[in-house]
Amino acid sequence: MNRFWMALSATAMVAMTAPACAQQVQYYNVPPGGRAHDVTVTPDGQEVWWTVQRGGGHGILNPATGETRIIPLGEGSAPHGVIVGPDGNAWITDGGQNAIVRVDRQTHAVKVWPLPADTGPINMNTATFDHRGRIWFTGQTGFYGRRHAGLGRAARPRPLRHRHHALG
């Protein structure tokens, strides 16, 4: 069944419509302080993940039971985007820690790869993986960068030199 998931940060809820063209919406309350930001669903549909931007966490919802859990990501965390990586784990861009964060789906262990200290905060956004297993990310201050899943640190982000606009 096709489902459309959304984060409703102002109402501290995650919502799902099924099917996307229906007038039905299912709402799920998230824990106090767990305001949802970005949201993604695991490929098997058993979990819905969101970022807790103001609370520094990774939210997990079991849509079958409505049970939720928040995994703390570390001191100063302010996560923005969450995606499912090729390894099946949650990969998060964290502007507060200026880092890429991975949360293991089975153990909930958190691994943080900070950007080089002299980069300065880049206000990280949602990331994506390429076909070689590298995670690419952007920063709202005009940076882009990547990290290979097997390396111990993120590549130095680079400033965007040219801005391209799609023409209709």
Image (cartoon, rainbow, N blue to C red):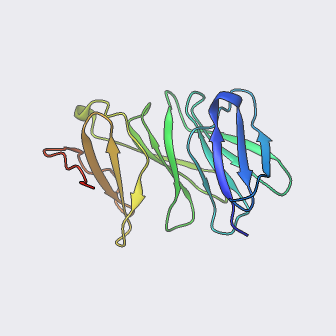
In the rendered structure, the answer to whether residue 101 lies left or right of residue 50 reads left
Total labels: the figure holds 0
Which quadrant holds residue 133?
bottom left
| Any part of residue 107 in sight | no
Q: Nearer the viewer, residue 29 or 111?
A: 29
Image coordinates for residue 126, horizontal then vertical, percent: 44, 47
Image coordinates for residue 29, horizontal then vertical, percent: 78, 37
Which quadrant holds residue 45?
bottom right
Residue at figure coordinates x 56%, y 60% from the top left: 89
Q: Nearer the viewer, residue 58 or 127?
A: 127
**Above/below status of 78 relative to 84:** above
Residue at the bottom extreme of this rendering: 131
| Any part of residue 55 in sight | yes
Residue at the left extreme of this rendering: 161
**The N terminus - image quarter:** bottom right
Residue at figure coordinates x 78%, y 43% from the top left: 28
Image coordinates for residue 51, horizontal then vertical, percent: 58, 41
**Above/below status of 84 relative to 1:** above
Which quadrant holds residue 62?
bottom right
Image coordinates for residue 64, horizontal then vertical, percent: 84, 58
Residue at figure coordinates x 82%, y 47% from the top left: 67
**Above/below status of 107 relative to 139:** below
Residue at figure coordinates x 57%, y 32% from the top left: 56
Residue at the front extreme of this rendering: 168
In the rendered structure, the answer to whether residue 158 lies left or right of residue 110 reads left
**The C terminus - image quarter:** bottom left
**Above/below status of 103 relative to 130:** above
